[in-house]
């Protein structure tokens, strides 16, 4: 299983699929499945049964996970999509932008 370089609250851009070009923040990262849930991207319609909290029921729109290879991280400093290199400092792993060299977290 490959390591994911994208984490929760990262800003990403969608590279392929029906939402190509869309940007959003990562709401959830699912490393075991190699997927991420991005805000307002890959919206699907789910049918909700009537319940105590939602007596009406009906259809709701929720974000579905997309594969991590279909998104690219946006560097907070240079505002460009970039790959990530990892450097160790004081025993901690730090993500670094490949384009500008800035630390990401």
Image (spheres, rainbow, N blue to C red):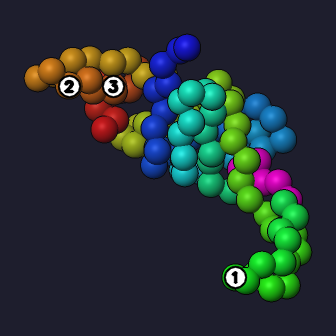
Name the mark nearer the viewer: 1 or 2: 1
Q: Residue farthest to the top?
A: 1
- Give the alpha-carbon distance from disc 1 to disc 2, as whole Å: 44 Å
Q: Which mark identifies residue 96?
A: 3
Q: Which image quarter: residue 70?
A: top right
* Between 76 and 65, the one nearer to me in the picture: 65
**In the shown orientation, is residue 26 left or right of residue 100?**
right
Write down the region rendered in magenta: 41-45
Is residue 18 found left or right of 99 in the rendered image? right
What is the spatial separation of the Cα atoms under label 3 and label 1, in whole angstroms? 44 Å
At which x and y percent is residue 26? 54, 47
At 70% from the left edge and 82% from the top edge, which residue is drawn?
Answer: 53
23 vs 45, nearest the viewer: 45
Placement of 40 over or under 92, stated as above or below: below
| Lower position in the chain sequence, tag 3 or tag 1 | 1
Q: Which of marks 1 and 2 is nearer the N terminus?
A: 1
* Residue 58 seen in render: yes
For the N terminus, give its image quadrant.
top right
Q: Is mark 2 on a helix, strand or loop?
A: strand
Front disc: 3 or 1: 1
Residue marked by disc 1: 53
Which residue is at 26% across, 23% downward?
93
Q: In this view, does 51 lie above or below 97?
A: below
C-alpha span from label 2 to label 3: 13 Å
List x then y, in percent, for residue 37: 63, 45
| Image height of 93 relative to 63, above or below | above
The label shown at residue 15 is none
């Amino acid at each position: 299983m490959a390591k994911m370089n994208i984490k929760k609250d990262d800003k990403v851009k969608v590279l392929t699929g029906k939402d190509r070009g869309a940007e959003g923040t990562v709401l959830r990262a699912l490393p075991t499945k190699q997927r991420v849930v991005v805000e307002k991207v890959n919206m699907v319609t789910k049918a909700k049964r009537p319940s105590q909290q939602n007596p009406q029921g009906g259809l709701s729109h929720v974000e579905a996970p997309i594969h991590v290879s279909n998104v690219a991280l946006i560097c907070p400093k240079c505002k460009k999509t970039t790959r990530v290199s990892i450097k160790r400092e004081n025993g901690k792993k730090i993500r670094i932008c490949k384009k500008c060299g800035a630390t990401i977290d």
